[in-house]
Every structure is written in structure tokens, then in C-alpha cells.
Image (cartoon, grey):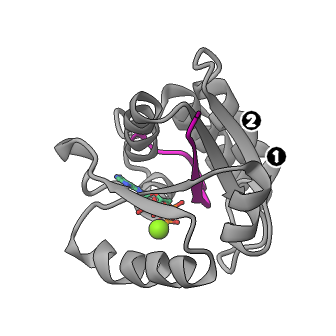
Amino acid sequence: MSVIAIYPGSFDPLTNGHVDIIQRGAHLFDRIVVAMLVNMDKSPLFTVAERVDLAREVFRDHANVEVDTFDGLLVDYAERRGAGVIMRGLRAISDFEYEMQMALMNRHLNPDVETVFMMPAEPYTYVSSRLVKEVVALGGSVHGLVPAIVERRLREKKLARETLRA
Ligand SMILES: Nc1ncnc2c1ncn2[C@@H]1O[C@H](COP(=O)(O)OP(=O)(O)OP(=O)(O)O)[C@@H](O)[C@H]1O
Ligand SMILES: [Mg+2]
């Protein structure tokens, strides 16, 4: 029986922390579905299409990593995709409380879907999409913290915004 794992998130944009978790998952499970939440509260820097393209580009050579979008209840999406696992990353104790709530709520909604947590390599434990965007907006470097193509797109976005403002 092949095990499909969903890795849900906003990925605005994909960071090397996300990449680390996806690679670990790809060793454990038969298939990883990186699932981008379409309707999120946060107003995103990258459109869904841009976020999907970036992740597809980064994982183009990984046959068992797929990138998709979803809306609505995560457990319903998991069921539609035939996935028995939800994958999440834990960076610090501060992630724990929210992640535990979500995992237990999802278990309440569908006991057949198991949430699995993984820790990234140490250099990525302080990396979040929010912080990456903040650093770039203020002119700092995120080299090594995001894939090269993401670094390029972030720089293009920043230039585009500055041009618009000028
Ligand atoms: N550096 C990282 N190491 C391990 N897991 C991570 C890392 N960054 C995010 N994750 C995990 O990936 C999943 C999806 O997270 P999400 O898309 O919210 O990314 P994020 O970096 O936390 O973005 P934001 O700053 O916008 O909240 C969550 O389980 C989150 O804990
Ligand atoms: Mg987050």
C-alpha cells in the first residue's frame, strides 16, 4: 500500500525550511503533495499561481513530490487525495501549541488521517516566510535561506514595488 502525505501551508514563499521538511518526507512516504492554501487570512506577496510555479520548479526532478492547491477543510482534501498523513514542521516550542491544536482538531474531524511532525536541520529553525519577506523588504540578504529561484523572484518583486512607488 502506498502512503501519500499532504504538506499543507501558505508557502509565501517556499523557504529552505519547507524544502528540508519536504525532502525528509519524500524519504519516508511514497508521495508528498505540497498543498497551498488558496484562501488565507494573510494577504500574500506571491499569487497562488506564482507560489505553485516556484515550488514546482524547485522540485521538478523529484518524481514523488507534487504541488497542488486546496481550499476548505484540510481533512476533506486529504480524503479526496487518498492521503493518510498530514505532514507539518516544528521549528521551536512556539510552533507547538498551534500545531497540536490543529492536529487534534483534524483528528477529531477525521480519525483516519494522522499528523506527523518533523524537525528541520538546525540552520532553518529560525526561518519563516514572514521573516524572509521582512528581511528582503528592508534590503537584507536571505541567501542560503530560500532556494535560488525564490531569492531571484523576491528581488524582482521588491524592484517592481519600488518602481511602482517611484
Ligand atoms: N523553517 C522551517 N522548518 C520547519 N518547518 C517549517 C519551517 N517553516 C515553516 N515550517 C512548517 O511548514 C508548515 C507550513 O508553514 P507556513 O506555510 O505557514 O510557513 P511559514 O514559514 O510559517 O510562513 P508564515 O511566516 O507566513 O507563517 C508548518 O507546519 C510550519 O510549521
Ligand atoms: Mg507559519
Q: Is residue 111 above or below residue 80?
A: below
Measuring from the top left, give residue 3's x and y in whole percent: 55, 40
**Residue annotated with mark 2:** 53
Q: Is residue 138 magenta?
A: no
Residue occupying the point 48% across, 57% down: 129
Give the quarter of the figure containing the N terminus.
Answer: top right
Can residue 134 be seen?
no
Residue at left 67%, top 47%?
157
Residue 39, by quadrant, is: bottom right
Side of 14 where 72 appears, left or right: right
Give residue 115's position: percent from left, percent from top: 45, 63
- Tell me if I can see residue 6 in this picture: yes
Residue at disc 2, secondary structure: helix
Where is mark 1, residue-wise? 49
Tell me: 166 left or right of 109.
right
Spatial separation of the CA atoms under disc 2 and disc 1: 6 Å
Residue 143 x %, y %: 37, 34
Position of residue 82 measured from the top left corner of the image (x, y, whole percent) = 71, 49
Left or right relative to 103: residue 61: right
Contact? badges 2 and 1 (CB < 8 Å): yes
Q: Which amino acid is tagged 1?
A: Ala
Query: Is 154 or 3 nearer to us in this picture?
Result: 3
Q: Is residue 99 above or below residue 85?
A: below
Q: In the rendered view, does 133 fall on the left or right side of 44?
A: left
Q: For numbered disc 1, what is the local secondary structure? A: helix
Q: Which residue is outermost to the front?
A: 1
Range of the magenta residues? Answer: 1-16
Q: Please say whether residue 11 is one of the residues in the magenta stretch.
A: yes
